[in-house]
Image (spheres, rainbow, N blue to C red):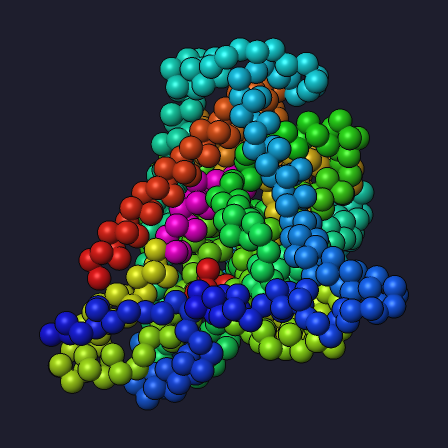
Amino acid sequence: MATSISARGSDPGSATPDRPDRTPPGSSPRQAWRSRLYRWDTKGSPYVFVAPFFLVFAVFGLFPLLYTGWLSFHQVSLYNVDQSTWVGLKNYTDLFTGPASHFFWNALWNTITLGILSTVPQLMIAIGLAHLLNYQLRARSFFRTALLAPYATSVAAATLVFALIFSPESGMANWFLGLFGMDPVAWEAGSWTSQFAISVIVTWRWTGYNALIYLAAMQAVPGDLYEAAALDGANRWKQFLNVTVPALRPTILFTAVVSTIGATQLFGEPFLFGGQSGHQGGTANQYETLGVFMYDQGFRNSMLGRASAIAWTMFALLLLIGLVNALIARRLRKSQ
Amino acid sequence: MTSKAPSAPVDATPPARRRLRSRKQGAGRQHHAGPLTYVVLIVVALASLFPLYWTLVAASTDTHAVVSTPPPLLPGGNLFKNLNYVWHNAGGRGMGVALLNSTLVASSVTIGTVAFSLLAGFAFAKLRFPGRGVMMGLVLATLAVPAQLSVVPLFILMKNLGQGNHLSALILPSLVTAFGVFFMRQYLVQALPTELLEAARMDGANSLRVVWHVVVPIARPAMAVLGMLTFVQSWNDFLWPIIAMNGSSNPTVQVALAGLGTGWSTDWSVIMAGALIGTVPLLVVFLLFGKHIVGGIAQGAVKG
């Protein structure tokens, strides 16, 4: 922030208009024209530079945001999108207490349990891995690249591979359990088992990514903090708890927020995990998330108004998470 | 015992020089990894890489072999047969077309995002103009808007414009990201000396010349990082493509893969061949530029 203030003081644009050598009195018309052009350029170019962002965002971000809100009070068919009937709050009451409420609350609950199952272990493993990667290592870049490779895999490819690994009849996971004399698990059909399997996919894809974020933050911790802790007689575990973790607090908060937002919008993994039954998040909707529910209602059951209401409910949920996060951040800042 | 430690403030954006120094200090306290560390890291690395290897194994066998007990652990002889099949048959016109489409979409999105983020990031970092603070606030506020909120109206919009099933439906909405603008701004605030801009201005360079001859050369590393992150993200985008391209004969890789996975027949070795084709290009890019991506993730996250 300090740099932006210093930049303001010596701004390239603000100094130019009143620079005398540019527009000497009695200069030729051509020079005057040029200096006017120059002034336009300085004044106008910032707006030209930021215009593409705001133009694209207005059309493809802001307009849809408001239009979704408008649509959520209407009944709209997928096949006749130009004809909409005003239904007031019906889409919302349908979700909360009406005919769709069973599926809505189920999807909300699944989003929460899947979110916890995939976020908490992921971040805890990531911070442990970052700690290990922070040691002086041989083959350091091999480990970093290997851990990050899943990040370069798409939701679709990753989910299909894991669906094969967790396939009920003779998938690799059940074969592996069988080696230890355990009975095969119905990964897809069970409620907790399917959610566990899906959270494994999420964790597999994102743990390395988060580990590298933590690693970067760890390397910015000044070494003398550790020396002081060591002089005080703290062993490595105590150093990790009392130096590393507190120093990483802002980063932990950042990754927690990003992961939570991602978990709230979880779609691809539960959509593809069950093959044909995936559109409803499993044969008994046992892993249907809000994202899948929205797709199902809007683009399979042709109820775009209800889908819009689900989207706005998700938005409200995200705002709530943002609010809680801001409160936690403030509390943390005060306690420091 | 370590009462000093928690009270030490951690600067999220240390100047480059301070970071270098602290890293040097850090090197002194870094312990050598013990054997247990290596064991854990090797196990985790194997867990990271195994599903990718298993994709290759499954893609090179046939349906019966994939689900046999014990499962095959070495590649079989059917790889090219399976690849050939999905290359020509998956998603209507084959995985080859899907690969081309994904490349086209991800490249366009990347070029647009990097260019527009550079321009806007430069303006927010170094130029002073009325409304700058409000506009930057607006950019940041858009970070919180989830993708689900825009899919229904975009679907209607594209349908009315006749862009359904057309690749531009995937490219146009993704041409800018708030993250990109923010990322570029954070980079240029520190990396671009204001004196250099003033000097160029004194020499009579107009804004475009300043951008091209001063800003672009300095921003090149950040452009590369943002470009790679954007390419990966665009390539792997799923929700909007599956809605915009539903039932399309002109799919992207992800849409074609989803079609393979949710079809009635589950010929796993063919599905895995498709997954292999969809994954390998990105993995190659990733291996070529891995170091930069690793650095970029760290940079974007710590500063973000």
Residue B72 picture location, percent across and down: 55, 58
- The mark total stands at 0
Nearer the observer, B53 or B254: B254
> Residue A35 is drawn in which quadrant?
bottom right
Quick check: can you spot residue A70? Answer: yes
Vertical placement of A301 versus A248: above or below? Answer: above
Quick check: can you spot residue B294? Answer: no
Is residue B178 on the magenta stretch?
Answer: no
> Residue A98 is drawn in which quadrant?
top left
**What residue is at 36 percent from the left and 32 percent from the top?**
A109
**What residue is at 46 percent from the left and 56 percent from the top?**
A206
Nearer the observer, A297 or A287: A297
Nearer the observer, A28 or A155: A28
Vertical placement of A309 versus B77: above or below? Answer: above
Is residue B118 left or right of A177 when viewed as pictured? right
Which residue is at the far left?
A: B1
Is residue A222 left or right of B205 when viewed as pictured? left
Q: Quadrant of the C terminus of chain A?
A: bottom left
Q: Main secondary structure of the magenta part?
A: helix
**What residue is at 88 percent from the left and 64 percent from the top?**
A29
Residue A92 picture location, percent across and down: 45, 18
Is residue A261 on the magenta stretch?
Answer: yes
Is residue A160 left or right of B37 when viewed as pictured? right
Nearer the observer, A162 or A300: A300
Query: Which portion, as a residue range, is magenta?
Result: A254-269
Vertical placement of B43 versus B164: above or below? Answer: below
> Residue A332 is drawn in which quadrant?
bottom left
**What residue is at 66 percent from the left and 52 percent from the top?**
A47
Q: Quadrant of the N terminus of chain A?
A: bottom left
Residue A145 picture location, percent across and down: 52, 70
Residue A100 picture location, percent across and down: 45, 17
